[in-house]
Image (cartoon, rainbow, N blue to C red):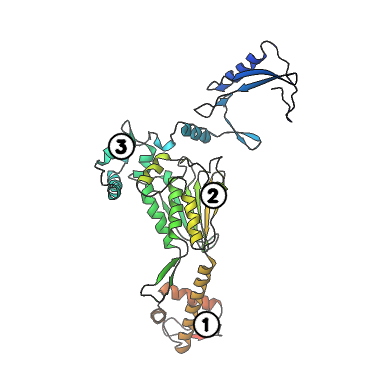
Amino acid sequence: MGISDNGQPIGVNLAAETVPQWINEVKNKTAPELIPDAEIFELQGKNIVALFVQEYPIKPVSTRGRYFKRVKNANHQMTATEVADMHLRTINSSWDTHMDSEHTIDHISLEKVQKAIDRMRVMRSSIIEDPLSFLLKYNMLKDGRPTFACYLLFKKDDCLISTIELGFFQNSITIKDSTRSKTDLLTQIDEVMNFVVKHINKEIIITGKPQNTERWQYPLEALRELILNMIVHRDYRSSADSIVKIFPDKIEFFNPGSLPDDITIEDLFSNTYRSNPRNKAIADFCKDLGLIEKYGSGIRRVVNYFAIENRPMPQFQSQASGFVATVYASESTAKSREKSREKSREKILRLININPTITQKQLEEETGLSRQGVEKNLKNLKDKHLIKRIGPDNGGHWEILEQP
């Protein structure tokens, strides 16, 4: 006190009780109570007072019953979730390490626990515990009840808390396939990955070697890394669901739980930040299970996978309610798909020209396409007014209207 905004000493008028009153103001309006140290000195003949407050080890500290955070040059009141998260971080804990009072050990599948033990034994043969002892070793049982991490990882039955919505879109509004996953987290990793792989394309690249090369529309390692990050680092206290949207040219992964205030999108790309997992127990267990290599490096690995294959770079966006990762199909893959469709349509036209009475079954055999593939190509040719069906399916024939 006594220094102007531009750094010039202007001094303060001090009575005998001025500084003690200031100290009491701070003490009485903070919880836990903060008691500053004070120093009075002169600068250019002016009285200056400096207050020093030691950083309190357990955070946050309230003032008048409210908690605030500094964002750029403004104070913002913290939400209840932000207060809880900050408190848990300062005691080196997280939400998922605490006891789940709504569920008991009867809600836990010991068979699923045993599967995790068997998987770990492949990497570390020294594990000898039975399922219950194993859970105790990982501090997933407290006073006989499961922790939140234990319940999410090994729950017997589906529940809303872990819901992931999955959709395959023809365009921005037309859904061609959808499903919903509500099972345990370890099972969800495979369920989500299988749904994504089902709806992305794969090229077979003929190399002249005995075995041809497969090239997926996206690097599969990167997709699995994104799915792992989504499931492990989700904010399970949020009422929002995780959402995966697959489009012909991109995939969007939305996850409840935004980035911490001290981490930016640029930090994710450069990997210059200190990782502090939202769900420490889940992240630690998945690391021991071999699913996670290193805390905080997942996004960087995703970027590297796309860079190695010269694919378009993923985009990441932090939202107030969550985090969105978007990956894009390479242009070459899209062109290859369209070229393959054109070849199929040209072959169908040639076959119809040779034999106008050819059946759909014969077209499937001659082209090697599935029934659905032949139907799509015939519909496309009819929509473009290149062919027309004369007569019924049985006994009719095709007529070529014009060559493409």
- Residue 189 appears left or right of 134: right
Residue 338 % position (x, y) = 52, 73
Tell me if mark 1 has few (under 14), some (14-19) or many (20+) residues whose alpha carbon lies within 10 angstroms of its own.
Answer: many
N-terminal label among 2 and 3: 3
Could you classify mark 2 by the number of other residues whose Cα lies within 10 Å: few (under 14), some (14-19), or many (20 or more)? few
In this view, the residue in front, 357 or 145, is 145
Q: Amino acid at mark 1?
A: Ile
* Mark 1 secondary-structure assignment: strand
Quadrant location of the N terminus in the rendered image: top right
Q: Which of the two residues, 107 or 96, is positioned nearer the viewer here? A: 96
The span from disc 2 to disc 3 (Cα, nearest Å) is: 36 Å
Q: Which residue is mark 3?
A: 137
In the rendered view, would you say 385 is above or below 334? below
Q: What residue is disc 2 on?
A: 270
**Amino acid at dot 2:** Ser
The circle drawn on residue 387 is 1
Q: Is residue 43 above or below residue 312?
A: above
Query: Disc 2 vs disc 1: which is toward the camera?
Result: 2
SS type, badge 2: helix
Three-letter residue code for mark 3:
Lys
Query: CA separation, marks 1 and 3?
Result: 70 Å
Mark 2 in CB contact with mark 3 (< 8 angstroms): no
In-front residue for pair 84/244: 84
Give whichever of discs 1 and 3 has the lower sequence position: 3
